[in-house]
Image (cartoon, helix red, strand yellow):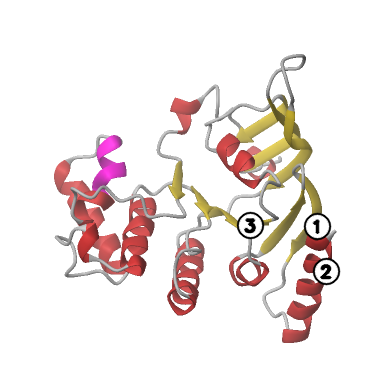
């Protein structure tokens, strides 16, 4: 007997198009055009493409913030736009900017998602402290965002996402504002946490090197969002393999 949970992708785009504007009432912009893509549970997928290629539109449709103009988007077999409430707590977002509440200390910011899920106070605090410690911020529970460095604030943001135990993480260039060394270290830790905790992660990026470091799969988009490359990476890629992939992607993005 086939296990249905294995057959259903964690995230699915089936011939999805998304346009903005109304026909006959000015210019219609097509952000996504006939996109079909399946992402399985436990995959870490880097979505790579130039500005304006539809990455953020895809991101918003997965999060249930917009509906496709044509086709079907499914998250865990559900319509994320029409069934938004049923996916509450199943998806967490890590933004480009940390988006911490300035009037809340680190622990209060990490607890925010749990608070919205109506978890008891003591449970929220225990989980929040655990994740702050896991992200190297033990002792900073009572520090406010203005007292933290950029890298520390982003660690709080990542702790907030993992604290809810959401099965899907949507990451919108979360390390692009950080210096190279801080970003490199946080990327490594993020990948480790995703794999240790069995999460499915979608990681939007403009950087080929970041995609190679983050993803076990890289999806390269052309404008409007169409798949130009969909590549599953082996764990033992040589430097030459990575350079070959880098050149292939660079060629696609240069067209």
Residue placed at 34% from the left, 66% from the top?
150
Disc 1 or 2, which lies upstream in sequence?
1
Q: Nearer the viewer, residue 108 or 4?
A: 108
Q: Quadrant of residue 28?
A: top right
Identify the residue shown where x is 25% and y is 50%. Answer: 109
Q: Which residue is mark 2?
A: 248
Q: Residue 255: image x %, image y %?
A: 85, 58
The span from disc 3 to disc 2 (Cα, nearest Å) is 18 Å
* Lateral position of residue 56 relative to residue 133, left or right: right
Per the image, is 5 magenta? no
Query: Within the magenta stretch, is there residue 113?
Result: yes
Residue depicted at x 68% and y 43%: 54
> Relative to 73, is 218 above or below?
below
The reply to whether callout 1 and callout 2 are in contact (CB within 8 Å) is yes
| Label 3 crowd (10 A; few <14 / some 14-19 / many >=20) | many
Disc 3 marks which residue?
45
Residue 60 in which image quadrant = top right
First in residue order: circle 3 vs circle 2: 3
Q: Which residue is mark 1?
A: 229
Q: Which residues are magenta?
A: 111-116
- Crowd tier of the residue under label 1, counting other residues whose Cα lies within 10 Å: few below 14, some 14–19, many 20 or above: some
User: In what element is the residue under mark 2?
Assistant: helix
């Amino acid at each position: 007997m086939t296990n249905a949970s294995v057959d259903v992708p964690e995230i699915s785009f089936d011939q999805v198009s998304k346009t903005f504007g109304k026909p006959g009432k000015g210019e219609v912009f097509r952000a996504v055009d006939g996109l079909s893509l399946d992402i399985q549970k436990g995959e870490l997928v880097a979505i790579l493409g130039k500005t304006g290629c539809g990455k953020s539109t895809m991101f918003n449709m997965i999060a249930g913030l917009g509906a496709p103009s044509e086709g079907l988007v499914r998250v865990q077999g559900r319509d994320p736009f029409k069934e938004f409430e049923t996916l509450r707590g199943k998806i967490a977002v890590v933004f480009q900017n940390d988006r911490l509440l300035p009037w809340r200390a680190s622990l209060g910011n990490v607890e925010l998602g749990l608070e919205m899920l109506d978890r008891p106070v003591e449970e929220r605090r225990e989980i929040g402290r655990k994740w702050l410690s896991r992200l190297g911020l033990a002792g900073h529970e009572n520090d406010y965002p203005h007292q933290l460095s950029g890298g520390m604030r982003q660690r709080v943001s990542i702790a907030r996402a993992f604290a809810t135990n959401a099965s899907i993480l949507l990451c919108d260039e979360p390390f692009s504002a950080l210096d190279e060394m801080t970003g490199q270290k946080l990327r490594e830790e993020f990948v480790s946490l995703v794999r240790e905790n069995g999460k499915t992660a979608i990681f939007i990026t403009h950087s080929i090197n970041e995609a190679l470091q983050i993803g076990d799969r890289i999806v390269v988009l052309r404008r409007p969002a169409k798949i130009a490359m969909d590549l599953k990476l082996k764990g033992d890629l040589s430097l030459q393999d990575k350079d070959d992939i880098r050149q292939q992607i660079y060629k696609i993005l240069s067209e």
